[in-house]
Amino acid sequence: MIKLAAIGGGTGLSVLLNGLKKKFEVSAIVTVGDNGGGSGILREDLNMLPPGDIRNCLLALSEAPDDLRKLLSYRFEDGSLKGQSLGNLIIAGMVKSEGSFENGIQVVSNVLNLKGKVYPVTIDNMDLCAVLTDGVQVRGESEIAIFALKRKAGIKELSLMNHVNISEHAKEAISSADVVTLGPGSLYTSVICNLLVDGVREALKDKKIVYIANVMTQPEETNGYTLYHHVEEVERYLGREIDFVLANDVLPKRELIEKYSFEGSIPVVVTNEDREILNTKLITGEFLEVKSGYVRSNSKNITDTLSELFDV
């Protein structure tokens, strides 16, 4: 079975993993820059890496009974734990019990009967910093989104507040992978942020890389971005060209476009200019689906396309 390292974070990566695990030997390399919500609280209170994105990936790769997965997905609705995920608390407990973040994740992985592996991109404290297009500097992943929206400014430059090193497990997973995927997910705070970790770009130097483009723009990060603008930014931080770009070429229904447009988000369409610039490395298809009224990446179709591309 072909080994695939999937790099990213947020909802985008976990959605993709649901499909990938069926045809590839998957290792998820996950960002740990989150400092908001329940993850941010645990990060500050317990001096640990944020567990939220890791939890989502664990659940996506899990082959455990539905009741157990439902339990770890439960989010408290009131009281002092309002907004906190039970899965986050369990991970935090295992991290403290086992003495390290990676050991704690391994225990939870065993309990959830994972079909694949989940590793943090780094085990160092990772904090994001962005310079917005209006020149304002913002520190912290959640603050970047808040200030970008508030000031109606894009992200001009993303960096880390301190040097952090790639984790050994992440380095090994990339080294042994036959193919590496980047995305889908928030362009800067879920995808590009991983490329800023010392050792990641070096590990990717000779790898076959597929960028899986988002199906919709995000007002706080990619307002007005074309497909090529996404690709151009990834390649700028990666320091090399991407081998293949998977991009959706099917529009959602008009009412959904109107709903998302009201929120400042539009479809990432493939233009003729995109086709000319990206040429043979561009692969298009029906890579979106609608679930519960929300537009998401279609993990099955993406996985099927990757399978054909790499003869799985």
Image: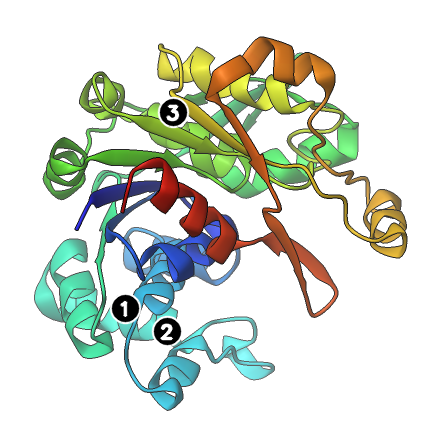
Residue type pointed to by label 2: Gly
The number of discs equals 3
Query: How would you rate the neighbour count of disc 3 (Cα within 10 Å): few for under 14, some for 14-19, many for 20 or more?
Result: some
Q: Which residue is mark 3?
A: 161
| Residues at marks 1 and 3, CA–CA distance in whole angstroms | 26 Å
Q: Amino acid at mark 3?
A: Met
The relative height of residue 268 versus residue 46 in the rendered view (above or below) is above
Q: Which residue carries the number 2 mark?
A: 87
Confirm whether residue 155 shows in the render: yes
Q: How far apart are the alpha carbons under marks 3 and 2?
A: 28 Å
Instruction: Single out the mark in the foreground, 3 or 2.
Output: 2
For the residues marked 1 and 2, what is the alpha-carbon distance in whole angstroms?
Answer: 6 Å
Question: Contact (CB < 8 A) between labels 1 and 2?
Answer: yes
Amino acid under disc 1: Ile
Among the two numbered marks 1 and 3 on one chain, the one whose residue lies closer to the N terminus: 1
| 265 up-or-down from 137: above or below | below
Q: Quadrant of residue 187?
A: top right
Left or right side of 291 for 32: left
Relative to 129, is 215 above or below?
A: below
